[in-house]
Structures are given as C-alpha cells and as structure tokens.
Image: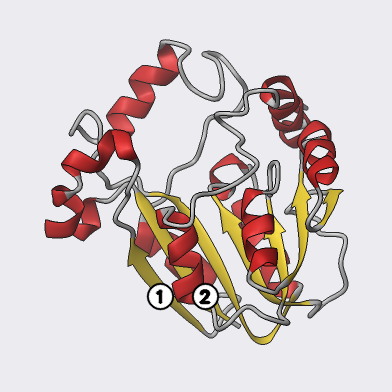
Amino acid sequence: MINLESRIRERFDEVSGDWDTFPAHIEPDDFEWLAIKRALPPLAGMKVLDVGCGRGRFSRALTSEGAWVVGVDLSYRLTCAAAQLGDADFLQGSITLLPFAAESFDAVVCVEVLEHVPNVPLALAEMARVLCRGGKAVIIDKSLCSLHPRFLLPSVLVKSVMERANRWMYPSGFEFAETWFVPRVLSRQLKTHFSSVEIRYLHYTYRKWRARGWITRLLPFLSMYVAWVAEK
C-alpha cells in the first residue's frame, strides 16, 4: 500500500526550491493575510499555530503583529528554509498527527494546505484538538464551485486540463491529486469539531487577476478562494 503522505512530502521536497511558489514574506495587502486578520482578534500575545507553513510567510506576518507563532510543515526542506529565516519557531510535522498537547494554541491558521491532505477529517480533528476552548481556526483553500479568475471557466475544468498537461503541483499519473472543496460540505465536516463555522468568500487581489476582480465582487460565491472561520 502506498503511503500517500510520504509521497506528498517527497513531492514538496522536490519543488521546495521554487521561491515563487513558496515565498518567504507576504505583502501587507495580500488578500489571504487580510482575511486572517479580519477573522482573528488582536494578535498581540496570542499563541498561533501555522499549519503547512512552507517557508514561513504567514508565520512571520503573525509574529510581526505580536503573536507567538509555531510553524509546522510536512516538508523537511521547507521547514529548514523557514527556520533559517527565523522570526518564529519552525518544525517538521504532519497535520494529521500534530506534535502538541491538547488546547495548546489560541488560534490555528491553515492556508492552502488541506487540498494536499489525503485524510481531511483527521486533519480537522487534529486542528480542533490543539486549539483552546473559544479559539479560532482559519482555513483558507480553494472552492470546487468557483470560476478560475484567469480563464473565466469552471476552476475544476482548468485544474483537470492543467494536471493532464503536467502543469500543476502533481505530475500526471501521480498517486494523489489536490482536493478542492464544496464550501458547505467542508463546513459540515468542521461542525463535527467546532461550535460554529462561518464561510467567507474572498476577493482575490493578485495583480495578474485584478482586472477580473469584479466577478467576485458581484458574485462572491464564484471566488476560487474561501475562508472557513471555525470557533471551538
């Protein structure tokens, strides 16, 4: 039986040198960062877990707001790259077996990570386990029901074509393909571990797609990016 998580880790280690895919820092007006700040209370003094931290861009942004941050990533190479740049604590670990005691954090941030997780229910349970009562998890990922902001076609169609053309994170024939989510379905899964869940459709501000941003302003549910804000 293939260990999918090991294969995914190997794939991330292979592509970890692509600094465009894994930036170390984030712009102050980044739409995902702004969504995190809107979802959480003032960050000063909070203990925050950044799951799937990559090179630590969100970890550093959270630290700059006064939070005490731990970044965890499945990839050994990305974890090492993050640790070299500092500004937070970084370690290698899996979202399905987080190396922390229960109720260790005031908030959990998980940005474009669940799509790479074979066992999503277990990942949700682990994030809830390490979160304190009253704490919040902010999960940002891609919607299966969206329009792709570049091609203005169903995102799932664009994803399928790009995967077959070997122009995606995982090459054609790889044992795993990214999982995108129906917002309300993931919300129902979250409600098994959290007392409340809110779906927030995000207006993307990537410069290359900005001219088409009117679509998500007019029809937010077509946005490719969604934030699920879950309170324990």
* Above or below: residue 194 compared with residue 221: below
Question: Does 117 appear above or below 218?
Answer: above
Q: Is residue 79 visible?
A: yes
**Frontmost residue, 229 versus 39:** 39
Q: Which picture quadrant has residue 186?
A: bottom left
Q: How crowded is mark 2: few (under 14 residues within 10 Å), some or many (20 or more)?
A: many
Residue that badge 1 annotates: 198
- The residue at which mark 2 appears reads as 230
Q: In which quarter of the image is the N terminus?
A: top right
* Placement of the C terminus among the 4 image quadrants: bottom right
Q: How crowded is mark 1: few (under 14 residues within 10 Å), some or many (20 or more)?
A: some
Contact between labelled residues 1 and 2, with CB atoms less than 8 Å apart:
yes
Judging from the image, what secondary structure is the residue with disc 1 in? strand
**Is 40 situated left or right of 2 in this image?**
left
Where residue 202 appears, as percent x and y from the top left, is 33, 58
Name the foreground residue: 50 vs 160. 50
Amino acid bearing label 2: Ala
State the image coordinates of residue 191 (x, y, percent, origin top left): 51, 75
Residue 53 location (% of width, % of height)? 69, 49
Find residue 124 and report its horizontal and vertical position in percent: 63, 63
Residue 213 vs residue 196, the one in the foreground:
213
Q: In which quarter of the image is residue 66?
A: bottom right
Q: Residue at x 34, y 18 (%)?
A: 161
Residue in view at x 73 percent, y 82 percent:
45
> What's the CA distance linking mark 2 and mark 1?
6 Å
User: Residue at 51% across / 35% down in the picture?
Assistant: 178
* Drawn side of residue 19 relative to residue 198, left or right: right
